[in-house]
Image (cartoon, grey):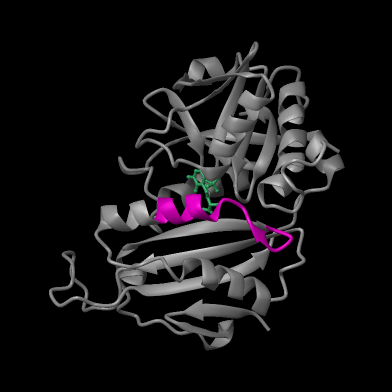
Amino acid sequence: MNQVYLNGEYLPREEARISVEDRGFLLSDGVYEVTPAYSGRFFRIPHHQCRLAGGLEALRIAHPLDQMEEVHRQLLRRNGLEDEEVATVYYQVTRGVAPRSHHFPLDPVAPTIYATASAFKRPARSRWEEGYGAITVPDRRWSRADLKTISLLPNVLAQQAAAEAGVKDALMVREGVALEGAHNNVFFVFGEQVVTHPATQRILHGITRGYVLELAGKEGFQVVERPVQIEEVAEASEIFFTGTTTEIRPTVQVDGRPVGHGVVGPVTRHLYDAFLAGVPREVGLIPAGAPQG
Ligand code: PDD
C-alpha cells in the first residue's frame, strides 16, 4: 500500500485528505521539489532543499525544512523503495488553509505539507539510443520561471502539445530564445561547445542541469551559458534535455526536422555515460576515490 506524508503523518494515499480551502487547491499558492534517490541514496538533497527554501522565501511562506530529509528517507523506507535503482520523492508546501482571498490569510495559518515517493523507470539503453523528438512551443509562463511553484498550467499545456504531437519534449521559446523544456532544461551542442541558457529568472535552475554542466567541464568540453536563439536550433549538432525525471534525454528531431544527422550524437552519449557512472559516486554508492569502472 502506498504511504504518503501529510502534515506530520504517514498514511495510506487513499486516506490522505486536504481541505477544499487549501490555497494550493484554490490558488496554486505553493512550491514543490522532486528529488531523485539512487538505490536509496538521495542525489544532491541539499541543493533541492536550498532551491525549495528560496521558493518559500520568495512566496513568503514560513516553513522550516529541517524535517524534509527525514520525510524523504521515511517515504522511501515505508514504500519499499530503498533498493529501487531510481526513485523520486515529490515534496509540496502550500500556504495552507484559509477562506479564499487573493491576499495572504490575515491570521497566520500552518502550511500544508504533502510528500509522496515513487519508482522511476529509466528507459532501456536501446530505446535511449534511438533518440526522441521535441516540438517548440511558446513559453507562456510568468516572469519568475526560476521559482518551482505548483502553478504549472503553461507547462501542462506545453507538455500536452508535445504528447499530442507524439513527441517526448516541449522546447519553450520566449522572445526568440529557446529556454528550456516543460519539465526539464535543454542543452545544445555547437561545434566543440556545450551550451545552455544562463540561470536567470527565465528558467528553472535545474539540479541536473548544474550537475551536467559540472560533468561537461570535467569531461573536457567547452561549456557556455548563453541564450540560444530559435534560429540557431537548426544549427545545433546535438540537443538534449536534462532533469530529475529526464536524466539526460537525446533529441534527434525538433518540429519534424532532424537535429544534426538525426541520430544520437557523441557528446550526448559521452555525457550520459559520465552521468550514469558519476551518479553512484555522487550519492556515495561507490567511494569517491575508487578507480573508474
Ligand atoms: N521538473 N525546468 C523545469 C520547468 C522543471 O519543471 C524541471 C524539473 C527542470 C529540471 O530540474 P531538476 O534537474 O532539478 O529536476 C527544469 C520536475 C522534475 C517536475 O516538475 O516533475
Residue 236, percent from left and from top: 62, 17
293 or 188, nearer to the observer: 293
Q: Residue at x 56, y 68 (%)?
A: 72
Q: Is residue 114 above or below residue 282?
A: below
Q: Pick the residue in front: 279 or 201.
A: 279
Any magenta on residue 238?
no
Which quarter of the figure is the C terminus placed in?
Answer: top right
Residue 147: % across, % down: 37, 48
89 sits left or right of 261 in the view = left
**Number of marks in the image?**
0
Q: Is residue 205 above or below residue 268?
A: below
Q: Is residue 152 visible?
A: no
175 or 31, nearer to the observer: 31
Q: Residue furthest front?
A: 289
Which residue shows up at 47% across the image and 27% down it?
197
- Please state the extent of the stretch shown in magenta in the rendering: 38-52
Q: Looking at the rendering, which quadrant does residue 176 occupy?
A: top left
Left or right: 148 in relation to 223: left
Please state the horizontal and vertical placement of residue 203, each as a whole percent of the image: 42, 38
* Position in image of residue 255 (x %, y %): 61, 29
Which residue lies at the image location 43% right of the left edge and 24% below the top edge? 177
Residue 24 position by quadrant: bottom left
Residue extending furthest left? 106
Residue at the outermost top position: 191
Left or right: 43, with 183 as reference point = right
115 in relation to 250, above or below: below
